[in-house]
Amino acid sequence: MTRNGGELGKADMHLHTLYSDGTASVRAVLDHVERATDLDLIAITDHERIDGAQRAAEIHAAGDYSFGLVIGEEITTRRGHLLALFVSERIPALRPLEETIERVHDQGGIAIAPHAMAPLTPSLGRSSLVRSHAADPRHRLDALELMNPSTAGRSRRAARRRLNDEILGLAAVGNSDAHVLDGIGTGWTWFPGSSADDYRAAIAERTTRPDGKYWSHLHNVDVYRRQLRAKLRHLGHTLRPSGEWR
């Protein structure tokens, strides 16, 4: 049974919290998903760290939430950003793309290219995508983010979709890349089932479908402003052992 009442599950697997450049605590994210969305599955994917996602998993396990949670990370490779889902250990940044994908797979995870080919955000370019497609299976991407409502996701979207249709043939996913609470669930993936295992199977079988609505330029500017305010407000709190921001 899905939370949206339909036959397909709904997943948003690219969310940020105060552990990196998001504006909300992990608890606030979980509570917002429960209260204000119909998502069946989410992933916390902070930049260069998984401790926020691990903290979210602790809160989720102790709570009464009706959606699933996956631990993830958004990793900066030498070729651009990479989403790692279903990982248990942090993967180091600024390593070669092939090595990073292999490290994801070694943990039993899946590797997704977010906002690929975007010019203003560190993103995998066309040549990197094609090279990954032709590489050893250990170094191949598992999915391509074709719906990302941010400015980065809007850019080159037609070229990205065409490349996947004509050459890559990767599982197509959608995510919000949300850094603010009201961005969560504005981009998502439809998939058969509703659980994390169902999502993994859908990626492997390429039965996922991206969906969502692009943000306005004004909303993007507002997000950047809120990110800056949040970072100023929580400056120096990163190493604090406990506190509201977690």
Image (tube, rainbow, N blue to C red):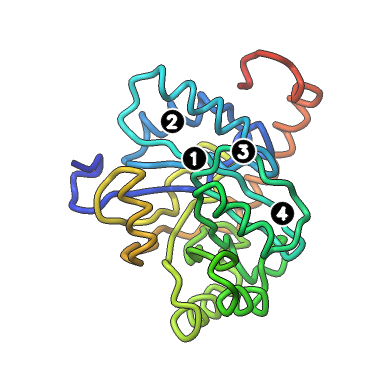
Q: For the point 55% across and 80% down, which residue is it?
A: 159
Identify the residue under disc 4.
76
Give the label, 3 or 1, closer to the camera: 3
Contact flag, marks 1 and 2 (Cβ < 8 Å): no
In the rendered structure, which amino acid carries the disc numbered 3? Answer: Glu
In the rendered structure, which amino acid carries the disc numbered 2? Answer: His
> Going from the N terminus, do you reach mark 3 or mark 1 first?
3
Identify the residue under disc 2.
32
Contact flag, marks 4 and 2 (Cβ < 8 Å): no
- Answer above or below: position of 44 versus 215: above
**Distance in Å between CA atoms under marks 1 and 2:** 9 Å
The numbered dot on residue 89 is 3
In the rendered structure, which amino acid carries the disc numbered 1? Answer: Asp
The numbered dot on residue 182 is 1
Task: Pick the residue in front: 212 or 79.
Answer: 79
Q: For the point 60% across and 73% down, which residue is it?
A: 132
